[in-house]
Image: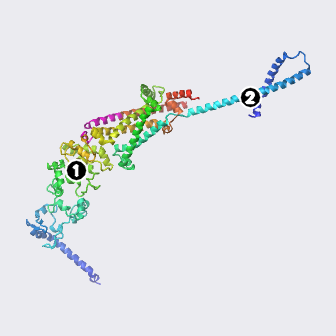
Amino acid sequence: MSAEQLKTAWTDQDTKALSDTLAGAVASALESEAPKDMTEEQAARLRNALSSALAKEAVLDARRAARRFFEEETKREKRAVREQVRVDKVADSVERLSLHIRVQHMILFSSCILLIVTGLPIKFHESAIAAFLIDIMGGPSVTRILHRIGAIALTFIGVYHIYYCMVFKEGRKTFDLLIPKLQDGKDALHQILYFVGIKKDRPLFGRFSYIEKFDYWAVYWGMVVMITSGYILWFKDWAINAFGKYVFDIGREAHSDEALLATLAIVIWHFYNVHFNPHKFPGSLTWLNGKISMEEFKEEHPLEYEEWLAAREKGGDS
Amino acid sequence: MTPGRTLSTRSRRALLALAVALAAACLAVGTAAQEDVRCLSCHGKPGFKKTLASGKVLELFVDPTSLRLSVHKDKHCVDCHADVSEVPHPNVPQKVNCRRCHYSGNTAGAPQIEKYVEFEQSVHGKALAEGNTKAPACQDCHGDHFILPGSDPRSEVSHKNLPQVCGRCHLEIFGQYEASVHGKALAKGIMDAPVCTNCHGEHTIRKAADASSSVNAGHVANTCAKCHAKVVIMEKYGVKAEQVATYNESFHGIANEFGVLTAANCASCHTAHDILPENDPRSSVNAANIPKTCGKCHAGANANFANGRIHINAKDKSAGIVYWIALGFKILTLSTLAGLFVHIGLDLYRKFRNRKAHHGEAKP
């Protein structure tokens, strides 16, 4: 802070106003103390004494006031910066999916891609692309091994997910939120009515909308069907000896049909919702960093956003 | 200079040889028929034969009418027995070489096809070339003097007679074939029934292990399909033509299609020559024999392998529970996809409308 700046803060007008106020106050204070008669010479000497005393006090007080002022000012600025930082952070994005969830999802989709690429060519064996795919992967003897590697990965993640849902706090909470409720049906209806223009605003979703719940339970159903039937096909001799040839046939039909259903559902539905939807195109990175933009968070999961804000205000300022 | 002086001695000799050859040819046309008379003076006598040093009796009688009724009716003895020029024969006449006429581009009137080349590459031709005295040459299947086209029922290689021809050497397999559903049908006069050549080929017969063989593991299904995929043929005998398609859709069929030749083909279960209907207790696909048949590959297969159908067409009610499961999944898949598409379509519709509305506000 330079003297020049301080001088500007203290203008001539301020000086004049101050001296007028001061002169009046000093005159009334002296009225009781001073003798009735004073010579011209006495009055001049009193003026000198008062001026120096007042100037001395005024400088000390001004110094104190200025110090106090700047201390307050610094505190205010610091608080404002802190607030701004928080506001900026909030406006950007929030981690919605934990690393634990993300890793499960990565293992799930990697094994699914491997299984689809090595499995569907068997279902569509007559097509040229099937022969091409099998060929570039090294022939049926290689693809059957790849398919079984995928099967083991999928089984592992399926079993691990159940463990996750039972043992981890986050897993239990997440699973609870994924259980379908009556509200999901209402939300779906509301959403459709909004789409066709009957309702003016969209339903307010919590952590998982009915769309996400559908995705989750479709995978759940698919895993149960594919893993059960898949192991019947893998351990066919044992399965036929134990249950009969028709059980193998059921397994084969279910495996083949559910494979197509799951693939189509993923390609059409899941890809639309997270990749090809005009709002998301060409795809979000949520699967990798777990983050969702604040804007999207408020838009897609308003109820979860409210909860998040409330939790933040309760424990976030410490 | 006179022309005579310009010819060298060698040229003159060549001209002379040509003249003699021409004269001989002219004579031959006139005398071939007379030659036949000369041959038949011995070979035309019934019972004319020779006992070889090995003790084997060689029948040498030739019925002249048999040649006259055959496809070679215009040929004469020496056209084929080209090495015979003297009587009595100073050397033992060689076996007739059919290739003298039977090649593409011949001028003797034989069909313009390369059957002989095909034969040379076949299992029989190769064995013959290697000096196997048991390997058959043309005459061993087609006969010698009384050769008729395969379409003639009297021909040795006619559809009806062919199994016996092959059976002369392949005795055991002939026995199996005769007892099989195909052999019995042929015996009944059903000409749709396959004979040896329908599966193995005629002049192209190769070992099953040969990848180009029609009975190689990679080709068996296609070979059987030549008849078994034809509804017109199969419906006459109450056999399902869809068995070919159901095999092609099975894991066995798909593996086979992608070159896994250890996967079962038609013959792996139905056998090659012993093929019998499912309800015959001797059949390899009779329920009682299923564990043994499947057990050839699926070690330890038990009676439960027969508990269910083999050729399954999931689109047909005969598939039982598999049909209902397939139908269930079809409904589930179609309804799910329809729902998803409607949802996506409505979502896009709303987004489009919203965008249009915003656009309208922007420019009043």
Reading the image, the residue beneath label 2 is: A66
Examine the rendering and report whether any part of residue B146 can be seen. Answer: yes
In front here: B19 or B152? B152
**Mark 1: few/some/many CA within 10 Å (<14, 14-19, 20+):** some
User: What residue is pinned by disc 1?
Assistant: B272
Q: Is residue B363 visible?
A: no
Question: Which residue of the protein is positioned furthest toward the front in this rendering?
Answer: A167
Task: Report the residue at 30% width, 40% height from top.
Answer: A239
Quadrant the N terminus of chain B occupies: bottom left
The residue range painted magenta reads B306-332
Vertical placement of A74 versus A282: above or below?
Answer: above
Q: CA distance from mark 2 to mark 1?
A: 111 Å
Residue B176: give x, y in percent of width and height.
18, 51
x%, y% of residue B47? 8, 65
Left or right: B93 in relation to A158: left
Which of the 4 quarters of the picture holds residue B140? bottom left
Residue A229 in which image quadrant: top left
Where's the C terminus of chain B, which quadrant? top right
Q: What amino acid type is highlighted by mark number 2?
A: Ala
Q: Are marks 2 and 1 on the same chain?
A: no
**Left of A188 or right of it: where is B139?**
left
- Label 2 packing within 10 angstroms: few (<14), some (14-19), many (20+): few
Q: What number is the disc on residue B41?
A: none
Q: Chain of mark 1?
A: B
